[in-house]
Image (cartoon, rainbow, N blue to C red):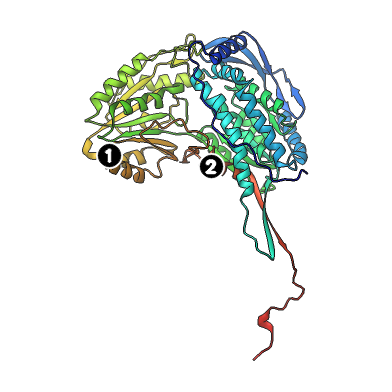
Amino acid sequence: MLKGFFHVPKAVNEPVKSYAPNSPEKAAVQAAYTTMWNSQIDVPLYIGSEEIRTGNTRNITAPHNHKHVVGKYHLAEKQHIEKAIANALEARKKWANMAWEQRAAIFLKAAELIAGPYRARINAATMIGQSKNIHQAEIDSSCELIDFLRYNVEFMTQIYNDQPKSDSTVWNRLEYRPLEGFVYAITPFNFTAIAANLPASAAMMGNVVVWKPSDSQVFSAKVIVDVFKEAGVPDGVINVVFGDALMITDTVLASRDFAGVHFTGSTHVFKDIWSKIGANINNYKTYPRIVGETGGKDFIIAHPSANVKQVATGITRGAFEFQGQKCSAASRAYIPQSLWPAVKEQLIADVKSMKMGSPEDFGNFITAVIHEGSFDKLASYIDQAKKDADAEIIVGGNYDKSVGYFIEPTVIVTTNPKYTTMETELFGPVITIYVYEDAKWEETLELVDTTSEYALTGAVFSQDRYAIEVATTKLQNAAGNFYINDKPTGAVVGMQPFGGARASGTNDKAGSALNLLRWASPRTIKETFVTPEDYRYPFLEKGE
């Protein structure tokens, strides 16, 4: 063991590159995109030191051109999941005991690999596999992922440095042990950074992981695996499996050594996992950590004092960036009557100016939604809105899946504040607006708070500080991330720790030390320097 109280490099947020015309980063990502688009990858299971190809494969396609195949990935059977668990537990023997600075060095190296030689590759993979435009890919798969890795190392050292008081007679210490067992990471398609962070944050704290990426994110997941391997993550620490989600989950949760789940995905799946953990609780060696970020029905509410252009931009960016496929995306808005004509005009003009198509064309703001199931769901809600008397589509409303899964950015206006698309998470480029009477500001705040089961993100726009104060107070439980005069998306690691409560999750705040604490099991050590040798206390002594 090395001797010294080591200081890690100060974490800084990775600057977002512009990808302006003739910039070197634009040329690099375009070259990577072309190469990866025209190649075929074969993604195995990564279990221990093995790359396992089962022969049971599924194609990897691009959402914006669903007939174009860029590779295939192999599906696991139950035996492979059991093998992954066994390999994780074997790797734990060395990994859990590795000095913290060695673990830190691995993930700091991973950050710099993404910042440098892997940047174009991971961005291109995200553009192809998840249909993100270059800006969305850059802020996600490069910058946010780099930030997670850098800041989590810093947060880890802050946690380790948090120690109890001692005095001259007693030395008290807190040891932050890895969990006793393995962690199950289940990650979504929509953020490459989240896909990497969920297994990495647990591993950084000395845990071993079985990681199941989304079937719709395998292309960039492969790049993450490549980065982790080059950075020096030992075999068996992060095992990667694909396949039937129900089978994988049931196999994992049946293990006595299951110690926790790190989840981002749908609310109903998370609740199902929680139920199964409860049913199996007598089987586990320890009480498992249950950490999840789930759905959202995120709001924007404008006060009559708000700036029209700011409100319109908050809606268009908040609702339509990455086709609304963010758990933080704005999907319901409340606009006062006095502002509505001007906001409406600006919204329509903005949406009509948006170009839609392949992310390869940097002029496209909108690309495709992730898969046919998502497309069909969104199309059905749009079709219903066209029929309903209490709803009107003022812009957008068209869709086409002949080449890719393209849904036009769509704005629905409703006279019913409890209209279905005001309450239901759609996860696509559709926002529903309710126009309220100016005098009913506080009543509308109550409506915002009680309309949805979710409490992830929300935003208030106002130039009136009293109104902001009222909204901040009345909506304190309506959103775990609350934005004042800004869109409800775009949380930055180290600046806006992310997460919500109610049906939106356990609010364990990714991008802060709070999340890392869930992957540690503290042990208090008390060392007494002069140990008593007589049981008798002074009160037992005889005296006058």
Quadrant housing residue 237? top right
When the figure is inspected, residue 510 is found, relative to residue 115, above or below; the finding is below
Q: Residues within 10 Å of mark 1 (few under 14, many from 20)?
A: few
Residue at image point 52% right, 35% down = 493
Q: In this orientation, does residue 377 appear?
A: no
Kindly indicate the quadrant of the structure image that contains residue 173: bottom right
Residue bearing the label numbered 1: 464
Q: Which mark is residue 508?
A: 2
Which residue sits at x=77%, y=41%? 93
Taking 371 as reference, is 544 above or below it?
below
Give the side of residue 390 with respect to residue 94, left or right. Answer: left
> Which badge, 2 or 1, comes first in the chain's sequence?
1
Image spot of residue 520 (x, y percent): 64, 46
How would you rate the neighbour count of disc 2 (Cα within 10 Å): few for under 14, some for 14-19, many for 20 or more? many
- What separation in Å lies between label 2 and label 1 (alpha carbons)? 32 Å
Report the front residue among 22 and 155.
22
x%, y% of residue 59? 62, 15
| Tag 2: amino acid | Asp
Residue 321 percent location from the top left of the image: 44, 23
Residue 355 relative to residue 492: left or right: left
Residue at image position (77%, 39%) is 94
